[in-house]
Amino acid sequence: MEIMLEQLRDVGIEQVNITLHHKSEIVTEYFGDGRNFGVDINYVTEERPLGTAGALGLMDPPNDTILVINGDVLTNLDFHAMLAYHREHGAELTMAVQQYNLELPYGVIECEGALVKSLTEKPTRNILVNAGIYLLEPEVYKFIPNGETYDMTDLIQRLIQEALPVAAFPLREYWVDIGAFSDYEKAQRDIETVKGRP
């Protein structure tokens, strides 16, 4: 999180909201009001976990585009490029997406009824995955319930249903979601690269 705060400061973001629930005192004691990190931090405490978008319903609706980042992401994404892309596409919400190569350990069969039409041995599928980084326009706040569990995936699905534009920004820079200990170890090895040092 400290690296992310430094990155936000370096691109000119001064106001940061951090949503907290479990062991929130550890985060608040470390970061304080944010002054030592060059930002102004406001804490939003969830009485119970509200999902990846639910805490946004506890905040006052913004007047301008906001950036939302999952706290377990390490990246050196170009935030200015993402914002330019978001505006260029007239999106109400833009999500950063990362290409992921899914290596299947089995032969994949395609059938028509009982007849086999093709067999591909251990193919690799290139898919796009959600990188946990979003830009939101104030308009989307009306779809976020106050004090209820709500995920970004719920919000995105709702915007799609409402025929509001949701854009996918291709993230080509370094990115890791620290969801497992092996990811944490990788992030520790890569931290200097993310900070822009060799």
Image: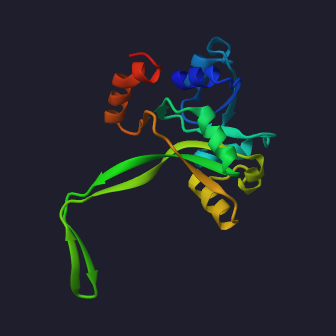
Q: Residue at x 48, y 31 (%)?
A: 75
Q: Residue at x 38, y 16 (%)?
A: 198
Looking at this rendering, what residue extends furthest in the top direction? 36
Residue 146 x/y as whole percent:
73, 50
Residue 149 x/y as whole percent:
62, 52
Q: Within the image, what quadrant is residue 19 found in?
A: top right
Q: Residue at x 45, y 24 (%)?
A: 194
Q: Within the image, what quadrant is residue 29 found in?
A: top right
Q: Within the image, what quadrant is residue 25 found in?
A: top right
Is 107 situated left or right of 145 in this image? left
Q: Residue at x 64, y 24 (%)?
A: 11
Q: Is residue 80 above or below residue 12?
A: below
Looking at this rendering, what residue extends furthest in the front direction? 88
- Rendered image coloring scheme: rainbow
Looking at this rendering, what residue extends furthest in the right direction? 63
Is 193 situated left or right of 148 in this image? left
Observer-nearest of 82 and 184: 82
Q: Is residue 87 visible?
A: yes
Observer-nearest of 36 and 54: 36
Residue 53 x/y as whole percent:
63, 47
Residue 35 x/y as whole percent:
68, 14
Q: Is residue 170 above or below residue 112?
A: above
Q: Is residue 50 visible?
A: no
Count of numbered circles on the image: 0
